[in-house]
Image (cartoon, helix red, strand yellow):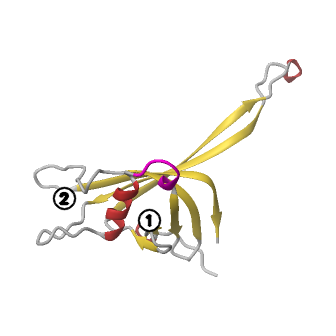
């Protein structure tokens, strides 16, 4: 076994395609997972002035940034980016869908996510000499699983 540092660009991101399969999200230039936890205060007089707690709940989200991908001849979009944008418009029970993050060595984290993304294929902008940007935030619902 040879352990080594991995480049962020070697991770794969896949989102539910709406028909039971998955589609890869392309054009990503950075991703930032963030964890959070909520503590329940268990401090008593016996704690001698030191706060005590237990973890009551945990959460996770992923911020993804990249480039807006579109064929300027016919307007077709990257399938993964387009699917993310569609999910970003959903409300109610159908707004939480499967998502997979796979490491270079094949370790997969599967989770259910809701999405906040640009509407209707719009770019997140850029300057005169910049490629048009694209972003999405995926918020995990429930406990992720690994395989």
Question: For the residues marked 1 and 2, what is the alpha-carbon distance in whole angstroms?
Answer: 20 Å
Q: Residue at x 60, y 46 (%)?
A: 59
Q: Which residues are magenta?
A: 90-95
Q: Which residue is mark 1?
A: 8
Position in image of residue 47 (x %, y %): 85, 23
Q: Does residue 64 sit above or below 5 in this rendering?
A: above
Q: Which residue is mark 2?
A: 131
Element on which disc 1 rests: helix
Location of the N terminus (image quadrant): bottom right
Q: Residue at x 60, y 79 (%)?
A: 2
Checking the image for residue 31, the label placed there is none
Location of the C terminus (image quadrant): bottom right
Element on which disc 2 rests: loop
Query: Local crowd at mark 2 within 10 Å, few (<14), some, or many (≥20)?
Result: some
Observer-nearest residue: 8 or 83?
83
Q: Does residue 3 sit above or below 51 in this rendering?
A: below
Position in image of residue 13 (x %, y %): 45, 67
Q: Residue at x 56, y 76 (%)?
A: 106
Position in image of residue 120 (x %, y %): 26, 54
Q: Is residue 65 magenta?
A: no
**In this orientation, does residue 54 appear?**
yes
Position of residue 108 in the picture relative to residue 123 (left or right)? right
Q: Quadrant of residue 77?
A: bottom left
Q: Quadrant of residue 46?
A: top right
Query: Local crowd at mark 1 within 10 Å, few (<14), some, or many (≥20)?
Result: few
For the residues bearing labels 1 and 2, Cβ distance under 8 angstroms:
no
Q: Does residue 143 sit above or below 47 in this rendering?
A: below
Considering only order in the chain, which callout, 2 or 1, is on the residue closer to the N terminus?
Answer: 1
**In this orientation, does residue 14 appear?**
no
């Amino acid at each position: 076994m040879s352990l080594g540092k991995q480049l962020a660009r070697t991770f794969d991101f896949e989102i539910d395609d709406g028909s039971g399969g998955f589609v890869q999200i392309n054009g990503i230039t950075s991703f930032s997972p963030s964890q959070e936890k909520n503590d329940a205060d268990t401090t008593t007089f016996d704690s001698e002035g030191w706060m005590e707690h237990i973890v009551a709940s945990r959460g996770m989200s992923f911020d993804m940034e990249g480039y807006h991908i579109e064929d300027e001849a016919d307007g077709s979009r990257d399938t993964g980016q387009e699917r993310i944008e569609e999910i970003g418009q959903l409300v109610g029970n159908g707004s939480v869908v499967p998502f997979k993050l796979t490491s270079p060595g094949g370790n997969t984290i599967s989770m259910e996510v809701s999405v906040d993304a640009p509407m209707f294929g719009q770019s997140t902008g850029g300057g005169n000499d910049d490629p048009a940007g694209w972003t999405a935030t995926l918020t995990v619902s429930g406990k992720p699983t690994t395989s």
